[in-house]
Image: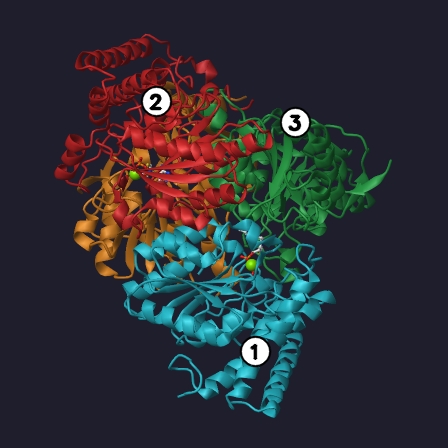
Chain colours: A orange, B green, C cyan, D red
Amino acid sequence: MREITYLEAVREAMCQEMRVNPDVFIMGEDIGVYGGAFGVTRGMIEEFGPERVRNTPISEAAIAGAAVGAAMTGMRPIVEIQFSDFITIATDQIVNQAAKTRYMFGGKGKVPMVLRTPSGSGTGAAAQHSQSLEAWMAHIPGLKVIQPSTAYDAKGLLKAAIDDDNPVIFYEHKLLYRTKGHVPEEPYSLPIGKADIKRQGTDVTIVATAIMVHKALQAAVELEKEGISVEVVDPRTLVPLDIETIVASVKKTGRVVVVHEAVKRGGFGGEIASLIAESEAFDYLDAPIRRLGGKAVPIPYNPILEKAAIPQEQDIIDAVKETVFRR
Amino acid sequence: MREITYLEAVREAMCQEMRVNPDVFIMGEDIGVYGGAFGVTRGMIEEFGPERVRNTPISEAAIAGAAVGAAMTGMRPIVEIQFSDFITIATDQIVNQAAKTRYMFGGKGKVPMVLRTPSGSGTGAAAQHSQSLEAWMAHIPGLKVIQPSTAYDAKGLLKAAIDDDNPVIFYEHKLLYRTKGHVPEEPYSLPIGKADIKRQGTDVTIVATAIMVHKALQAAVELEKEGISVEVVDPRTLVPLDIETIVASVKKTGRVVVVHEAVKRGGFGGEIASLIAESEAFDYLDAPIRRLGGKAVPIPYNPILEKAAIPQEQDIIDAVKETVFRR
Amino acid sequence: MITNLSVPPMITEAKLVELFHQMWLIRFFDEKVDEFFAKGMIHGTTHLCVGQEASAAGACAVLEERDKITSTHRGHGHCIAKGADVNRMMAELFGRETGYCRGKGGSMHIADVEKGNLGANGIVGGGIPIAVGSALTSKMKNLGYVTLCFFGDGASNEGSFHEAINLAAVWNLPVVFICENNQYGMSGPVKEMVKIANIADRAAAYGIPGHVVDGNDIFAMMNVTYEAVQRARNGEGPTLIEAKTYRWKGHSKSDAKKYRTREEEMEWRNNRDPIARMKQVLLAAGILSEEEAARIEAKARQEIEEAVLFAESSPMPSLAILEEDVYA
Amino acid sequence: MITNLSVPPMITEAKLVELFHQMWLIRFFDEKVDEFFAKGMIHGTTHLCVGQEASAAGACAVLEERDKITSTHRGHGHCIAKGADVNRMMAELFGRETGYCRGKGGSMHIADVEKGNLGANGIVGGGIPIAVGSALTSKMKNLGYVTLCFFGDGASNEGSFHEAINLAAVWNLPVVFICENNQYGMSGPVKEMVKIANIADRAAAYGIPGHVVDGNDIFAMMNVTYEAVQRARNGEGPTLIEAKTYRWKGHSKSDAKKYRTREEEMEWRNNRDPIARMKQVLLAAGILSEEEAARIEAKARQEIEEAVLFAESSPMPSLAILEEDVYA
Ligand SMILES: Cc1ncc(C[n+]2csc(CCOP(=O)(O)OP(=O)(O)O)c2C)c(N)n1
Ligand SMILES: Cc1ncc(C[n+]2csc(CCOP(=O)(O)OP(=O)(O)O)c2C)c(N)n1
Ligand SMILES: [Mg+2]
Ligand SMILES: [Mg+2]
């Protein structure tokens, strides 16, 4: 199968949907000839024209809110928020409007929109351009939250998100944009709410999201050399969360490390860890659940500090070993 | 000692600080002659005048941002955001500016501001006026987060918050405003980062926040009748979190239920539960950690549904019993 | 065709009579709600539009059924004017299953999607970007409908106002922004909250027309809205209309109204009552007689009584629906 | 006192020479940064203000040391104009411990609090409310300082612009809003992003004066800013100034500049270069000779080279500081 980048996979999912469904369009800042801050929409305005690839003023609240209104009235907007940190300007529209409209209206109306946005650190853009705030959105009833880690998942989940009748927040990790993977050319959809076992193993489960999936897989290779068999589970979607797959894995391995880039304190890892602890897997646990997450600091600029602020492969290796060799 | 309401305690803390420190002032919507949506600032404009009790236009982003700028340049602003749901409009200023300024500047400057805001459900104000989103703020390095449950705590913690050199988010629960407690007349400060054991017990620990402290205490009375001795720990401040006190309690009781009003999924209970599980208390646990939180729904209007959306005394009783009678 | 009154072309005599009735319906609805809140019979909070009937009724009068509106926390009038059933509205306030939102929304979230009412909104300014999105659909799908966006003077200081109107302006969308300037945002006098004489003057910041209108004159409301709706429908883009009006009641269920005088209130009640003013015109134009006017008033009053009966006799939602309707 | 040029009273000949030097410093700083980014020698991203030197230098020229500014992502010029040390700025870009932010902030977060620079800002429009807060302090403490608030044309479409300027207007705060309209917000042409000719026209929406000025004419910048600063200092409230200018470089480190033509760029570079224009005036007024001008230019270039040496030879921050500075 052909290999394309994660970025191309995202673009392809959008383009394929836009070719078949005239209700789908995209709006955002600089998504026209500029192609978006990361180049995801490059070429789209040339194919679909400025009516369907709508370059907006720098007005995140209005963009998100216009998407809500358009979605309520029959369109299926995709919104690109240039950096996920800027969701902070559109929060009311996402959290108080998009997420709640249907419920507040007693089941009337629907808001089929996708908000795509790059998140994560590693580009040296510092504190206001590097956050991982997916835990916020996952806390809000009415939203679905997706964090694909591979090109394959990105394409399939984005199609599913566009086809979904609810507001979906779709986090793209900046450092994954250039990663490549095998991706079918034809459109396909992956279920929202189905975790993926990215690597099978028997000694310990690592539940990892987004870029941490890759660090976990690298760690697993190293750990294998030391005779530790690691299973890597990628939830792919935080809401809905496929806790069954996670629990089944933990029951099998008896040990688990949860890892995400987001600040550990209050991160979604706490939710995952707690769900495991509350589940039938509790009685299978041979060691306490370990969580890894970002340090409680804004992301610093200096690249060495920046790296140190979030879990790295070695941190995962260390945590797995501590878990495995406990008692 | 004299009894006053939680609301009066909040007001008294502000007034006492404003009397002694000319840098302290308050701004917000309708905090003047109207006295704020809940009456917290009633009488303050009469005492301090419109220069120090600043009625603002309906502009949450500007209010929060102006507080950041004023705090950076030498004032100690208190901001009242009328409902905590409206933080969604000021999120950038709180999260990207207030919280990060000092770090981004490499330790230069400080942002001594307090953002006070009523949260929680129970008033029939429905989905956009009833949220409990404290987990969001607790996820952000650079902020401190306080959730007082009693009049006594409210007064002492608000003084501490005003005296603190950092941005502090101070959540006041609407249904607590009218509750009374013994409160000293003179100013006093409670340490930010110190949990309070609201009731001593030996069989099970309930970690409860805000209004849930009261429901937990009521549940404890009922459970006592059945011979179950409940310890109720109120963290009071989520950031910094006094995990030591919580862990010590759990080591003593061997069982723990964590309860908050906020939606369980992604709520701060996950953080607390995970910290307990990661701590030395893990080996003392005789039952899985239980979490109670709001259902994954926007808060509905109908009072019966509204109540059913969040944990009630009976839910706590049931959860405690399940925990205690496990195995 | 009405010859002795200047009204938009679709406004017939029958329609005027209907609007007169509608204004009474709005007034009685909100007075009844006021009464219930005062008695503690309704949960939550509410915001009444008594005194502001003409801006809701007049603006919506020139709309077609396919046109849409977005409304506010003070939205009962808009809702009725866009054709909602007062029974289902009252049932919603009573938290009943038969309410517009199955009892889940309450006063601040009544929506009537089928009739094109995209909902009240508990967030000041929250509906403005949504209206722009609705207008975008109309344009992209070439549906020809116009979206009327209601909000208050206070809302005009929210960032959402600015961002959304600018977006509508540069995209030339079929939306009409109606600022109901009732002189206060909760307790904040508009004179202290903006430094300009008219909110409508803000239109110039977006390159769109702005009009000030007497919001208590239903005829003026109809005419200025009609013109703006026509512009929008013809692809000429948005308009900002400022309707000067006044809310007779307090901001919400408890309000000592310290921020204004009783004299000011009386002036608006006695001399600028939108219903009394319309009645006078209809009488003078020979469209209504005193008796007919009284009959219409009584009928509206009766309909509200029936709405209360409907609401009271409707079932409470079952607990089973708590977790329904979160996702489509 | 300068008699043959119209300048604010505090602007001496020596100050003009200093400003000429400052503009070169700004230009060389950003050209050097550009070079390093192109070579991949600096981490992260940056936004260069080459071509916009006069608006930063001219506006800040009329400030006193106690006055404050808030800046933007495109902030190196403002920072230098408010008196920052280019060594420490360059060190920051190199992520060094000696940088203004100990390497934690980078290009988008340089602040120089002692000199009254409250910081660049990575959030478009993010600094506007902060400037208003700073002005509030001045008013409440009666400190007499003025806050200059820089932002771009693109930022004028953010809600924060609207809310903050309105707040400053109704509170009559000593703040001067300077919109550097460089014709684009990233790739968005201002012509497509607003439907008005001048951003300054938005001042009318807040009841404050608005002025359009040639942002590439440092004399015009000084005069219009001086007048606004005087007003602010005298308690007459805020002013909105729109400085028309142009950024010569791409938006940030990689930009194919498809959204504009090379001809347009050349027109601004060749005919409206703010440094060349100032030089011409200084030569004509006899304040500088060609030789002196060349010497100043060379000196500025040299200072930037030294800044690079300073930065390169500065230590990296130690990992130990990662968790410092989060709380005061
Ligand atoms: C974002 C937000 N801020 C504040 C409030 C609280 N609040 C509700 S209505 C209101 C006043 C609104 O004034 P205006 O827009 O003039 O409408 P009016 O009430 O006069 O009809 C306020 C402050 C809110 N609901 N939402
Ligand atoms: C809130 C927010 N939205 C978007 C961006 C991404 N961004 C950075 S600079 C920029 C363009 C800003 O335009 P303008 O205000 O005109 O300033 P200029 O870059 O032209 O100096 C954009 C869109 C951002 N940093 N913050
Ligand atoms: Mg009003
Ligand atoms: Mg620009």
- Which residue is identified by label 1? C277
Quarter that holds the C terminus of chain C: bottom left
Q: Chain of mark 1?
A: C
- Give the distance between the C-alpha atoms of the residues marked 2 and 3, in whole angstroms: 50 Å
- Relative image position of residue D195 (x, y in whole percent): 30, 53
Give the secondary structure at mark 3. helix
Say which of D60 and B26 sits in front: D60
Say which mark, if any, is on residue B163.
Answer: 3
- Which residue is identified by label 2? A222
- Relative image position of residue B108 (x, y in whole percent): 49, 20
Q: Is mark 2 within 8 Å of ligand 2?
A: no
Look at the picture and state if B134 lies above or below B161.
below
Residue at the image position 24 percent from the left and 25 percent from the top: D278
Residue at the image position 63 percent from the left and 29 percent from the top: B23
- Relative image position of residue B109 (x, y in whole percent): 51, 23
Q: What number of labels is visible?
A: 3
- Please, what is the three-letter code of the amino acid marked with disc 3? Asp
Taking the view exactly as shown, the residue that stands out farthest to the front is D3
Kindly report which numbered mark, 3 or 1, lies closer to the viewer in this rendering.
1
